[in-house]
Image (cartoon, grey):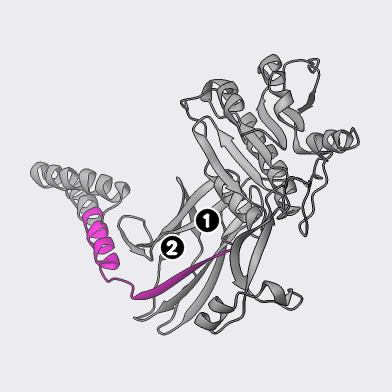
Amino acid sequence: MLTPLGWGTAAVCAPLYAAGWWLGYPEPAMFGIAGLAAVAGAALWTLPQAKLDVSREIAPKKVERGEPAVGVLHVTNRGRGARGVSAQDAAGPAAVAVDVPRLRSGGTRTVTYRLPTGRRGEIPVGPLRLMRADPLRLARRTREYGSPEVLLVRPKTVPLSLLPSGRAHHLDGPTSDRSPAGTATFHALREYVIGDELRRIHWKSSARTGTLMVRQLVDASLPTTTIVLEARPGSWPEPDDFELAVDAAASVAMAAASANFPVRLVTGDGQLAETRGGRDDVEVLLDRLTSVGTREGPQSTMDVVRRVRAGGSLVVVTSGAVELGPIAAVRSRFDRVVVLRVRPPGPASAPPGVQLIDFADLDGLAESWRRLGRVR
């Protein structure tokens, strides 16, 4: 219960009193008694526990890196008037100070405070620690409230257009004479919404659930956007460069997923995510990229590129030290190959069939990407 200041005061005042009493000097003894009395009074001050009901909300629970997020506390005093109460909420490795006003018996207050969103990742928030201290800060009582929650700080993105692949695809019919049954395949069941075609209603599921259910179809021939993210620690001496690479990968993935195109995310550890083109794909991809970090995977970036399934567009997000020649060797397996280099040390010439974008921030990526989209 005693703070370091309280322990220090007791450690000084006890021998001071003993010395004054032993040597016959009343002044040091009186100072010692006063200090010990202050420590004892501080312990008695903090002895009663505050009877509080505390609930926490995080709004919103998913944000882009750098966007604001707040914690909302609802505090109700079930006991006597609570004095000298302060609070700290854990937010990852940091502690956020929360200003809790004085509460009368039965009173309720709502307090909001900013949460740190400067770093991407899954940020555990809580438990909340309420601390009651005496005015001299000689003693303190701490109690935890609530269970931890998770704030998802997702990659920062910039709007990008979908790169043209040079191939046309249709959801309602075949794309070639060799696919007479068409390329639309079953993906999932969902509830009926106004505007859905009646021929897609799945009557057996509708009868079983009591709600109209329709079949959600995807075009299996849609070109996949494959994004290979370099995640080996040795390739990223600067952590901010890797964060920018994740932001770029998230921006490319969101551009393709927003157009309902399939997306495949790959690192040296293997496949991070694969979507087939649906309404919730953007959320899935951003959530997966939230927790990705640098680690020594079993494969290098080039090993991953060589093993990626052919077809569609290939986007390699890497550092400026990557060798472009091996990437050009797989050009014939894809409709389009783009290499995004983060803060390269100098300019480089792109091999035939490979389109190169060097960028130092997301705005530079967006501008270069727009110019690239006009190149057929």
For label 2, count other residues whose C-alpha is less than 10 Å away and answer few (under 14), some (14-19) or many (20+).
Answer: some
Identity of the residue furthest to the left in this view: 22
In the image, is residue 335 above or below residue 79? above
Residue 213 lies in the magenta stretch: no
Where, by quadrant of the figure, is residue 201 drawn? bottom right
Q: Which label is found at residue 26?
A: none
Which one is nearer the viewer's eye here, 111 or 171? 171
Q: Is residue 207 visible?
A: yes
Q: Nearer the viewer, residue 235 or 81?
A: 235
At 51% from the left edge and 76% from the top edge, which residue is drawn? 109
Residue 321 located left or right of residue 33: right
Query: What's drawn in magenta, residue-wise?
Result: 35-60
**In the visual, does 311 lie left or right of 151?**
right
Question: Which of the image's four quarters has the C terminus?
Answer: top right
Residue 24 lies, with reference to residue 187, above or below; the image says above
What residue is disc 2 on? 86
Q: In the image, residue 100 lies at what x, y percent? A: 48, 67
Q: 94 above or below 306?
A: below
What residue lies at 73% left-to-right and 54% top-to-bottom? Answer: 182
Q: Quadrant of residue 323?
A: top right
Q: Is 52 colored magenta in this rendering?
A: yes
| Secondary structure category for the residue under label 1 | strand
